[in-house]
Image (spheres, grey):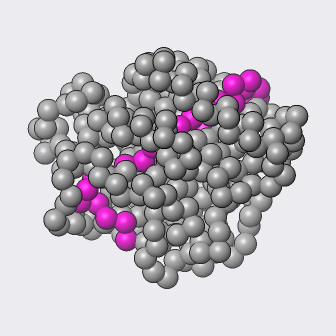
């Protein structure tokens, strides 16, 4: 479905100007959209997973912990499948957030995956420049991610950073020169962009950011974030965008659940080719581990169809 057709449908949450800005720039932000009581309830649930992590000495299928994690000072980098882990996260994903997705993807939308990321300070929690689409290619690029700030996020707290208009450029490989998946763009590819034009999106808790799956984006390292800067991310795709190759190990039972509208009878096909992602059949850690060089090993490209992935 083209932007013109999507914009012809009445908006549910976003203004027409916000919708147009998304298609032009590849991102949009709405401050304080989610009511405080909903954010507070989700934060209480989130605290229970932080407490659970105190008993952990290694990451598992639900919680990714980082270097330096201890019972006294937990370093939870990611709750891998919040939609699966607790119904409060799933309720948000199928509520007003899904309406936002509908405003930008068209009336028929399916849920792809979710994740809850943290930053605990110390300068080691950078997320390098990358695009989401190479992690989970679809038959067309009407795929996006919506981040919800569960705490106030200042400019020094690692807010989302996007290069405007980068979603209209090429799709980049995120393997290094040795064929190892890094989950980050190569330096030479980043140099194709004017990073001085980067837009940073700090905001109060309850704010949302939306970025296109092809938008080049990152987050800076932080120095000290007492809140952990929890960022709940939900990804969606238009119903006529079908995943054509994705790794199987980060499967969520809600993957490709229709959250608005009707199932597609035809797949919409983009002519733009996309690099094939790795075969992660033996396990996937997280973008933090990949970009932080904790898990550098040969990662052959995926030979066939897999269930859904969260990067």
Q: Which part of the image, by quadrant, shows the C terminus?
A: bottom right
Q: Residue 106 versus residue 110: which sits nearer the camera?
A: 110
Q: Residue 79 versus residue 222: which sits nearer the camera?
A: 79
Image location of residue 280, percent across then percent down:
59, 71
Q: In the image, what residue occupies the spot 34% across and 54% down? A: 257
Image location of residue 192, percent across then percent down:
50, 52
Q: Is residue 219 left or right of residue 67?
A: left
Image location of residue 81, percent across then percent down:
55, 50
Residue 238 visible in the current orientation: yes
Examine the image and state in which quarter residue 171 appears.
bottom left
Q: Is residue 39 left or right of residue 92?
A: right
Q: Which residues are magenta?
A: 219-244
Does the magenta portion include 117? no
Above/below status of 17 relative to 167: above
Above/below status of 173 relative to 141: below
Q: Is residue 47 left or right of residue 87?
A: right
């Amino acid at each position: 479905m083209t932007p013109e057709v999507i914009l012809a449908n009445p908006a549910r949450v976003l203004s027409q100007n916000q919708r147009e800005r998304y298609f032009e720039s590849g991102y949009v932000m709405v401050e304080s959209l989610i009511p405080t009581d909903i954010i507070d309830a989700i934060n209480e649930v989130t605290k229970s997973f932080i407490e659970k992590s105190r008993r952990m000495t290694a990451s598992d299928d639900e919680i990714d912990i980082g270097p330096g994690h201890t019972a006294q000072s937990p370093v939870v980098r990611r709750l891998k499948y919040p939609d699966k882990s607790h119904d409060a996260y799933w309720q948000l994903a199928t509520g007003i957030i899904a309406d936002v997705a509908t405003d930008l993807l068209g009336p028929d939308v399916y849920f792809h995956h979710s994740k809850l990321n943290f930053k605990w300070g110390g300068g080691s929690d950078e997320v390098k420049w990358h695009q989401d689409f190479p992690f989970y290619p679809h038959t067309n690029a009407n795929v996006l991610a919506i981040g919800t700030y569960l705490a106030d996020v200042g400019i020094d707290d690692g807010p989302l950073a996007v290069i405007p208009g980068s979603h209209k450029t090429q799709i980049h490989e995120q393997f290094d020169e040795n064929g190892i998946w890094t989950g980050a763009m190569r330096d030479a590819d980043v140099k194709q962009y004017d990073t001085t034009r980067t837009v940073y999106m700090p905001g109060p808790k309850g704010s949302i950011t939306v970025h296109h799956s092809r938008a080049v984006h990152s987050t800076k390292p932080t120095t000290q974030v007492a809140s952990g800067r929890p960022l709940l991310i939900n990804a969606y795709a238009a119903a006529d965008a079908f995943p054509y190759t994705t790794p199987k190990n980060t499967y969520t039972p809600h993957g490709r659940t229709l959250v608005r509208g009707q199932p597609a009878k035809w797949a919409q096909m983009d002519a733009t080719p996309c690099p094939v992602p790795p075969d992660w059949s033996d396990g996937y850690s997280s973008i933090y581990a990949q970009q932080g060089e904790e898990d550098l090993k040969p990662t052959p490209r995926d030979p066939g169809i897999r269930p859904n992935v969260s990067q």
